[in-house]
Image (spheres, coloured by chain):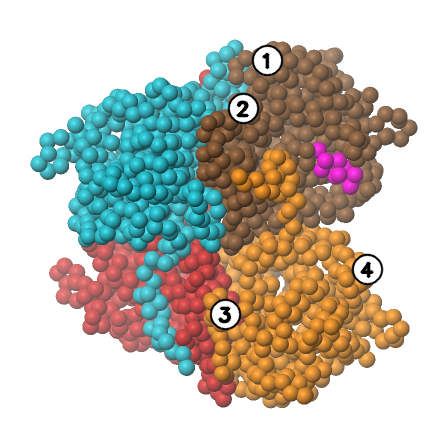
Chain colours: A brown, B cyan, C orange, D red
Amino acid sequence: MGIISGKEFLDRLDQLKNELWFDGKKIEGNISEHPAFKGILETKSSLYDLQTSDGLIDEMTCFLPEKKERIGLSYLQPKTKEDLKRRRRMIEHWARHTHGMMGRSPDYMNTVIMSFASSAPLLHDRENCFPEHIQSLYDQAMKHDLSFTHTFITPQVNRSQMNITTSENPISAKIVDRNDKGIVIKGARLLATQGGLTDEILVLSAPRFYFEEDEAFAFSIPSNTQGVKFICRESFVLGESAFDHPLGSRYEEMDSVVVFDDVLVPWDRVFFYGDAETANGFLAASSFNAFSYHQVITRQIVKTEFLLGVSQLLVDTINVSEYQHIQEKLSEIVTGLETLKALLEKSEHDAMLDGCGYMRPSLIPLQIASTVFPKIYPRFTEIIQLIGASGIMTIPTESAFDSEIKEDLDHYLQGTGINGKDRVKLFRLAWDLTMSPFGTRQTQYERFFYGDPVRLASRLYQCYPKEKYVKAVQEFLHVKNDSSI
Amino acid sequence: MGIISGKEFLDRLDQLKNELWFDGKKIEGNISEHPAFKGILETKSSLYDLQTSDGLIDEMTCFLPEKKERIGLSYLQPKTKEDLKRRRRMIEHWARHTHGMMGRSPDYMNTVIMSFASSAPLLHDRENCFPEHIQSLYDQAMKHDLSFTHTFITPQVNRSQMNITTSENPISAKIVDRNDKGIVIKGARLLATQGGLTDEILVLSAPRFYFEEDEAFAFSIPSNTQGVKFICRESFVLGESAFDHPLGSRYEEMDSVVVFDDVLVPWDRVFFYGDAETANGFLAASSFNAFSYHQVITRQIVKTEFLLGVSQLLVDTINVSEYQHIQEKLSEIVTGLETLKALLEKSEHDAMLDGCGYMRPSLIPLQIASTVFPKIYPRFTEIIQLIGASGIMTIPTESAFDSEIKEDLDHYLQGTGINGKDRVKLFRLAWDLTMSPFGTRQTQYERFFYGDPVRLASRLYQCYPKEKYVKAVQEFLHVKNDSSI
Amino acid sequence: MGIISGKEFLDRLDQLKNELWFDGKKIEGNISEHPAFKGILETKSSLYDLQTSDGLIDEMTCFLPEKKERIGLSYLQPKTKEDLKRRRRMIEHWARHTHGMMGRSPDYMNTVIMSFASSAPLLHDRENCFPEHIQSLYDQAMKHDLSFTHTFITPQVNRSQMNITTSENPISAKIVDRNDKGIVIKGARLLATQGGLTDEILVLSAPRFYFEEDEAFAFSIPSNTQGVKFICRESFVLGESAFDHPLGSRYEEMDSVVVFDDVLVPWDRVFFYGDAETANGFLAASSFNAFSYHQVITRQIVKTEFLLGVSQLLVDTINVSEYQHIQEKLSEIVTGLETLKALLEKSEHDAMLDGCGYMRPSLIPLQIASTVFPKIYPRFTEIIQLIGASGIMTIPTESAFDSEIKEDLDHYLQGTGINGKDRVKLFRLAWDLTMSPFGTRQTQYERFFYGDPVRLASRLYQCYPKEKYVKAVQEFLHVKNDSSI
Amino acid sequence: MGIISGKEFLDRLDQLKNELWFDGKKIEGNISEHPAFKGILETKSSLYDLQTSDGLIDEMTCFLPEKKERIGLSYLQPKTKEDLKRRRRMIEHWARHTHGMMGRSPDYMNTVIMSFASSAPLLHDRENCFPEHIQSLYDQAMKHDLSFTHTFITPQVNRSQMNITTSENPISAKIVDRNDKGIVIKGARLLATQGGLTDEILVLSAPRFYFEEDEAFAFSIPSNTQGVKFICRESFVLGESAFDHPLGSRYEEMDSVVVFDDVLVPWDRVFFYGDAETANGFLAASSFNAFSYHQVITRQIVKTEFLLGVSQLLVDTINVSEYQHIQEKLSEIVTGLETLKALLEKSEHDAMLDGCGYMRPSLIPLQIASTVFPKIYPRFTEIIQLIGASGIMTIPTESAFDSEIKEDLDHYLQGTGINGKDRVKLFRLAWDLTMSPFGTRQTQYERFFYGDPVRLASRLYQCYPKEKYVKAVQEFLHVKNDSSI
């Protein structure tokens, strides 16, 4: 088949009957009809339909050599810079459709799977590693246009560097048994966005300071595998009205804790296990960072464009463009936007073929963007609040505009060249973007997307090639590398 | 009577039948039972009861000379520095009861009314000014322990400096008629916190660049005066569970637009009218700023203490106190807290008797605090989010902890020395404080409490006495004031 | 001739006998031997020699079609993107030779002259405009490898927006007469870097709010024109020792006030005059910004690389790379460096042919870089001071290291793997870069290079195309451009 | 005698013949006549004279009970809050005389000696501790009005936490022998401000992570003790003209490395030795921090007042007070100034008698001020540069104003209501304050006065009492201290 329609996506998901716990209850019936998930699944469904829409099919899909069926372009393994640009356009289309608000649009995880497959050869001949299972998952995913969630991090029980937990009753998911059918996993993992709303769940141990061997593994299994539970947080869908909650009603993705109750992962689903070195090394050596950052930053640029549009529309609506401090705030957003664009383009221009034959975007510019965005995004949401001022609190609901006080509201809440209803619509958007549970979760999501900001900076420092600059200074000073007496 | 109980407060309010519009419907029945207002009114009721509670009655109330009934200490006109300190202790008690979360606890408006009365003599012998009506309102308020809301600002239609609106159908509330009974008001006013939830509404025209005479006035009328409508925004009470929404369920105050439909304000309720000069000058010359800032900053200190407690408890719970950047963040909060305290105390130490015989706190230190707090409060909420990280998204509901997955949650979500339920309770508080609609509204409220931050800085610059420092430099340089050739 | 040697440059300058006032005295004798100018002129001389050095001649010079003589590549009018990249490489060579410390290396002004010539056609058929004089100056400059200074701004007497000075005795240079030989200029101009150290001085009225016609003009004249005086500030060359003042002894460029005492500017040197509209419009419409920003940002990148090298060498020398806050600070510099590079490259990738047939770098990315650099450069100098700490104050002189206490110094001031002398050499460089009069003047220079930072932000806001982003939001909300009732 | 005159100070110093190395030469002859030290010594001399000047003698000096001679008030051990205020006024007088520019005015070290004596009883009955020697030094110092420098820190060879140096040939000063006459010290110490310009040098080992016993000691010896060498950095006196270098010519204090060449410290000069626990504990337990911070912050407030004066005079001179961003910048300085004042006053109001019977200012507010000032002072110098803009580069010398171009300069460099000479005088002051070697050294000095800013924040966090705030949150949540399952 290759590419699925929105309806196929929903039907398949409804049939999976994943074990999803919401507000103390196990979800029964079709998940696509549940108030907490309806909006996001509808939006996701529309994304699948976008792939095959008339105008976009050629930019969203492609044919693999010697294959007759189209596949989603997010699965394409790029071999040229032009491939990279095609990937970017595809990502932009999906991101524009959701204004960059869906962190886990299908292209994100498809890109991750693609990057794993592209780097699977790195695992050849390593003990307890099964690169062929990665390739096989990639083939299946592409063929069936599978959807994924993932979980990389462990529960936040104790973040001290000195903390090493060993427990009979594990908290962090670990291998508690292995047998001829596969490995058995028990424990929990954080924080699966769209957990339970996808066909598959990819589980991987992210690098860390100290590792028990039993906590080092990677695999992907169907979301409805026996013993897998997704436990949701409170829902941030506050209502169905697109006037009242223009973003939350459409894009709230949900996050969940994943619990593994002695889950059997069949051998043919295991990528590697019991190998801390691989767990610590594979992500860094693979094209995972390069390709996933390329997807993420493309989406974040689209999101920044949306914030710029909202900011400027607020400025117009209350007519404050003459103020210098307003101009400075807007120019901050403009500066952020153009900086991200320049970095993304540089990563494409400087792309190089990696050892496996794929065209990897240059990582440094993407890393820079990934340290910049978590700082500027929260600031941009603050700018919107600073522009909106009291207006962002003056937000009656849609019902009020449909009631007998409608005329009062249209009159008294009007803006510059705009009636009260449209003005409130805009300010509600500004609120939903920056101050609603949906909006603040977006801020937190972007802030921590790439991990702890402090560590990001350390990592950038450590991997950046500084030697030639040091050497130039040493030459200028006629100082040698080791001049000690 | 002098002091009312919580029950008296609720009963009186229920009987008023103020015209309150919520979600397109006019409130019918007892407002104290309405889901959107129940929580805040219960909290407010408990504040009234606090006044007469055993341990606090002597710190919360006092006797006026030659009177037999106790009055609330928030009505006390201070004549000594000791009076100021008594006022501070009273404010602290109320603020601690609500952790500084209730911007409009009764002492705020009582203080405003007290400050107006204390400066009423400034209006003697000015045309169209009625200082005796202020005094009379103050007497009534004290006697009946009246509750108030106020509205000082105009709708945000067009904030350009050049904008001067004149319209047949006014947007901003103005005098459209005056007759032998009083003045008639038509138009709207922003943004009455607790609008409709109080006995009275105080309306005053705040100073501005350009004034129509008809927009310059001040008065107070009962909230249920014919033609007064309060139109609410969306409610930020997300539910009744104190586990799920520990702050929103108790402290959500609501903001409303006030519409005046040809409202007759009787003469004996008018403080002044039709006088732009008075509107521009009275607030600044009166003790309004000194006394109200004294109340507000006391409350903000209590709030900052609460944030410090939450931050440190988060740090303990995930055991991150060893990290330098965590220590820096916490020391930022400590620095803010101690700075505010030092400024507040300085305002008391430097207090002086004003022309009307009342002990005014020194304004400069309070003004400094008022430019500092709107910057540090949002930063402190950001610090909480930065500490909380993914934990602040891992927030299942109370129902989940009462269901069959309770044990999973208690185990997998445990913190350092704390079970899952208590840990989630804490993180939900962190979320409600900084990321829920309640929390972000608090941030916006504090950010704009004293007005536009940019203008606050300008005003501070302009009123600060800089001459002696300039002169010292001129003397050092032997440069004269005017040395031009 | 086309390209001059360093010696030719010095000889020609010595012969000009420009009227230069330094410390109350008129310079007599060869300027190239004066202690205040010797260092910079020697460095400049070495830059001219670099043009024809063996390894670089092909990257530093080129042939014009049908010409036999080489010209400096800084004069090349780019017609392709490859031309732009050649220009960049040439700029990099010169900048590396001086570590980006010479703001007015010859390529800067050569680029300005080239940009004027490239846009001269815009002045065709405008009254009082002489595009042919620009072309002619460009031809002469190229032919003789002339050196230039310029002055665009007026004395800082009164910066109020309301200030309009008219005076018998002008302060700001203006046309006081025009006759058949030319225009006569009287008054002063700020702040000519290397004023008096060049063959020519280019004078142009930068756009401003209010213009007298008599203050609107542009011309270039020889620096030794009768009546032109250059009045120097204090010199920041603190001594000749390259150990003690590694930067100041080589790169101190001097700034001067230019006084015009009824200076006759011959007609064939006038570009335009008496035309406020042209003065306000030409710079913006021409390729001046695009080409000069391209030069400046290339140099600033080289400078940033130097700062990164110094920072990292400091870190190595006192062995502090393990500290998280050190890593964060260095990663800030890395982020700045890569951001500038990405923006510069984007400006080249997005370059387009302008109306006159030349390949203009895209202006927006360059403008972004020009708002970013003035903020990050001072911060980077602060980072160097923060890393250096007390070491940056522990700076004995070269003489001390040549005296009998040499061994004490080498021992007690040693660093990690480096003896005292080399360590102090490095810290003296850090001091000269950020804390000496030379260093702080560099900071101020970069901070204001592109003009007042506040206005830069306003200008960026105003010229940035925001419409499409606003429109996308309007479409999302189904809000129209003008929905007022 | 008790109090010395300026002349006595200079004569005594000239006679000491301290071994001072400057620019590779040992100072011979009277140090008070040496160009590098003349200015500062003259200023210091004027400070001593100030003690006995007519108007101030009663505020600068006092009588001890049962003594007939006056002593300097900086030696007074405060026993009441009024004593503290007297001390503050005395500090202000000296600080005002030097505009806060002399970090080591006599009162600083006198206060240190006084604090040591006041806490000497803490060392009673501890091994290798001699509290009586501290008392004796204090008595001598008071009696002879001795001047001091001190050195607390070790050379910056390797700042890694892991670094532990042991060496035959010590770098950091340590005890290499002890005999019946005293202890013998070899090695170096950083960075003695005014080293060699005082009667005595106080040496103390500041607390640190890892200590060799041999590096833990405290003593005071005459500066001219055999084997003590002071090695100066480059001088920042750039010339004698007070027009050209208004601050450097008067207040440049010099910093020096102190080398101990087998220096014998007589037993009666040793306070303690060979005791890491005491070295780590005494400073913290003593009143050293409380009293010395009280002195320092008083001086820093006076300095901030001076910066405010300079800033406002710049604003007036170029008439830019109408700009919002200028107003914001000035209000930043105002906010800093008032914050420091409030904290200082709080430390006095909250003062308490310590275990030794002296009135200690409350430490927390002083600690807060000490984390605030190192951040705001550099920012305020930046603000001055931002206001000064190009003017701060337009600084001809005094000679130029005495030459034949004087009239040009007076005319063309005039400001708003000020002639060129006075205007340049002011801008030269702004330059000397923020951009000259003197000025930038001041910035670095204030930035690191209290130690590494990162560690300051950590220390503040660690010592601040947070428990009650944590407990309030726990009570609000009904969460216990240890709820783990």
**Separation of marks 1 and 3 at Cα, in angstroms:** 70 Å
> Which circle, 2 or 3, is nearer the viewer?
2
Q: Chain of mark 2?
A: A
Q: Residue at x 66, y 29 (%)?
A: A104
Say which residue appears at 45% left-offset and 57% top-offset: D324
Instruction: Residue D364: say if magenta.
Output: no
Q: CA distance from mark 4 to mark 3?
A: 42 Å
The residue under label 3 is: D392
Q: Do marks 4 and 3 both belong to one polypeptide chain?
A: no
Disc on res. B335: none
- Residue B187, by quadrant, is top left
**Quick one: which residue is furthest to the right in this view?**
A66
Q: Residue furthest left?
A: B66
Q: Quadrant of the N terminus of chain A?
A: top right
Query: Do marks 1 and 3 both belong to one polypeptide chain?
Result: no
Q: Would residue A129 be found to the left or right of residue D220 on screen? A: right
Residue A27: mark in rendering: 1
| Nearer to me, A236 or D266 | A236
Relative image position of residue C123 (x, y in whole percent): 72, 71
* Residue C144, above or below C316: below
SS label for mark 2: loop
Dot 3 surroundings within 10 Å: few (below 14), some, or many (20 or more)?
A: many
Residue A86 lies in the magenta stretch: yes
Quadrant containing the C terminus of chain A in the rendered view: bottom right
Q: Amino acid at mark 2?
A: Gly
Q: Are marks 2 and 3 in contact (CB under 8 Å)?
A: no
Which segment is the magenta one?
A: A84-94
Q: Position of residue D33 (x, y in %)?
A: 39, 79
Q: Distance between the Cα atoms at labels 2 and 1?
A: 19 Å
Task: Name the residue at 63% across, 88% down.
Answer: C226
Label placed on residue A239: 2
| C-beta proximity under 8 Å, tags 1 and 3 | no
